[in-house]
Image (cartoon, grey):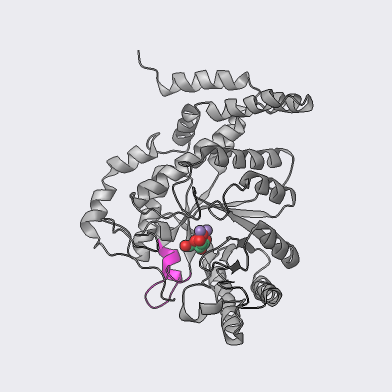
């Protein structure tokens, strides 16, 4: 006799009840979570060595909205599309029709990303550039971005500062730090009081000797100076090898300065691979820290976003699969027997403490997640299969012309 979802769900609930887990609380947490979809992930994207063109990949901003809406239909927790000021506007530079079309498709526009990397003027950086005119242009761009965010009702601005130097002696590092603060301060001061700046860090690339916001410490330092409206954004691919990201998360949560995530997986650098494929334990432990902080009464108002490059896989499938992996990691973080863990930690029982955490990590939470999907009103329990069976891929392959997207070249 085949077990039904209900059988498996009931069995899981019984197991979790014995582990002091409140199932309704877990389900509500899973239902409340929102993941932003980056508009740039649904088009053709690749590496700096080339881009493989995908049949049916999004070309226009309208395609990108359609694809995000289709992803949302399958997942139910991704109603926001994050935008980039260079790419997500009409040909004549308008944003309002984009917002209106998104609304027609049941989507909202999420975090807005300014551009300080794509354009000839940024050869020596943007706000950190030694060239005064470039710094002034950057500040004007920030004022314009805030105006657009207001128009689009976006409450978060995602700032990746691509600035850096390539050679020792190229520029004065402390002066660059001063210019960085001046530029960011200009952006923050222009923002409305209900807007938040999410400041992303990255150790290297596009520059290789120094990067002006190179790690979480520099991002935190700037955010501290900028005030309550500036928070750190953690892109999981932006760390050197071996860094314990979950410890960074714990620290930022404790400082109430964790603003957002760019989810992806890495093996070596900014690999932008599907989340949960290379290192599922890391994402589970990150969620454990967030869940623990929430239970301890710390604010956990975090903007979750994907930032991936689907180079060889179909982008829409890669995105759906990533969000499914996020749900799995999140669900597992919620079912840790925290009472038993607290007792074992008090007794310095290292082995049992780890075992309790791993028991949650190794639990099959799919019956719970599938039940949540049905309760959210989704058509079925498997978003990936739902997409594959929908006919959407066939439709876009038939109606869209394949074009290799080359990002860059200015706004
Ligand atoms: C930089 O590597 C980054 O992670 C930043 O978030 C950019 O906004 C994004 O990639 C776009 O390519
Ligand atoms: Mn990123
Ligand atoms: Mn990146």
Instruction: Give the quadrant of the N terminus.
Output: top left
Drawn side of residue 207 relative to residue 98, left or right: right
Q: Which residues are magenta?
A: 85-101
* Residue 157: quadrant of the picture: bottom right
Q: Is residue 203 visible?
A: yes
Residue 129 on the magenta span: no
x and y, in percent, of residue 326 in the image? 51, 42
x and y, in percent, of residue 262 in the image? 54, 54
Task: Check the image and report above or below for 39 versus 27.
Answer: below
Drawn side of residue 337 relative to residue 382, left or right: right
Task: Check the image and report above or below for 24 versus 258.
Answer: above
Task: Single out the residue that lies furthest toward the top.
Answer: 1
Instruction: Name the one closer to the observer, 116 or 64.
Output: 116
x and y, in percent, of residue 224 in the image? 74, 62
Q: Is residue 336 visible?
A: no
Task: Single out the residue that lies furthest toward the right.
Answer: 346
* Residue 144: quadrant of the picture: bottom right
How many circles with numbers are drawn on the protein?
0
x and y, in percent, of residue 389 in the image? 28, 40
Task: Check the image and report above or below for 222 versus 359.
Answer: below
Instruction: Name the one closer to the observer, 383 or 408.
Output: 408
Residue pictured at 34% horizontal, 62% vertical: 50
Instruction: Give the quadrant of the C terminus.
Output: bottom left
Instruction: Name the one closer to the observer, 357 or 100.
Output: 357
Task: Single out the residue that lies furthest toward the bottom.
Answer: 133
Task: Single out the residue that lies furthest toward the front.
Answer: 168
Residue pictured at 63% horizontal, 64% vertical: 197
Residue pictured at 52% horizontal, 78% vertical: 122
* Residue 260: quadrant of the picture: bottom right
For the stretch drawn in magenta, the main secondary structure is loop
Instruction: Name the one closer to the observer, 78 or 296.
Output: 296
Drawn side of residue 313 relative to residue 118, left or right: left
């Amino acid at each position: 006799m085949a077990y039904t979802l209900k059988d498996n769900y009931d069995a899981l609930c019984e197991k979790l009840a014995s582990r002091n887990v409140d199932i309704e609380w877990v389900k509500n947490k899973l239902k409340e979570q929102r993941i932003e979809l980056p508009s740039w992930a649904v088009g053709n994207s690749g590496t700096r060595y080339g881009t493989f063109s995908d049949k049916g990949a999004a070309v226009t901003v309208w395609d990108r909205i359609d694809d995000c809406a289709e992803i949302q239909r399958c997942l139910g927790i991704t109603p926001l599309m994050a935008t980039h000021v260079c790419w997500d506007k009409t040909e004549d530079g308008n944003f309002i029709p984009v917002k209106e079309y998104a609304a027609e498709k049941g989507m909202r526009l999420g975090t807005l990303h300014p551009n300080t990397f794509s354009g000839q003027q940024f050869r020596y950086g943007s706000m950190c550039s030694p060239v005064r005119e470039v710094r002034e242009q950057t500040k004007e761009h920030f004022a314009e971005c805030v105006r657009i965010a207001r128009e689009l009702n976006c409450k978060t601005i995602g700032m990746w500062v691509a600035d850096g130097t390539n050679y020792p002696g190229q520029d004065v590092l402390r002066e660059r730090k001063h210019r960085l603060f001046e530029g960011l301060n200009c952006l923050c001061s222009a923002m409305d009081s209900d807007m938040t700046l999410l400041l992303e860090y990255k150790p290297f690339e596009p520059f290789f000797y120094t990067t002006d916001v190179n790690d979480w410490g520099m991002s935190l330092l700037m955010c501290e100076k900028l005030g309550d409206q500036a928070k750190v954004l953690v892109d999981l691919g932006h760390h050197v090898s071996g860094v314990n990201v979950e410890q960074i998360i714990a620290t930022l949560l404790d400082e109430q300065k964790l603003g957002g995530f760019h989810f992806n997986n890495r093996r070596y650098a900014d690999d932008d691979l599907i989340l949960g494929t290379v290192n599922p334990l890391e994402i589970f432990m990150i969620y454990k820290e967030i869940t623990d902080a929430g239970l301890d009464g710390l604010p956990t108002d975090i903007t979750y976003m994907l930032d991936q490059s689907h180079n060889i896989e179909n982008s829409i499938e890669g995105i759906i699969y990533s969000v499914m992996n996020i749900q799995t990691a999140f669900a597992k973080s919620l079912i840790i027997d925290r009472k038993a863990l607290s007792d074992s930690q008090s007794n310095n029982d290292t082995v049992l403490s780890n075992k309790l955490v791993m028991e949650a990590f190794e639990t099959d939470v799919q019956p719970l997640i599938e039940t949540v999907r049905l309760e959210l009103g989704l058509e079925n329990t498997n978003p990936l299969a739902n997409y594959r069976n929908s006919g959407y891929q066939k439709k876009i392959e038939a109606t869209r012309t394949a074009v290799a997207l080359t990002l860059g070249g200015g706004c």
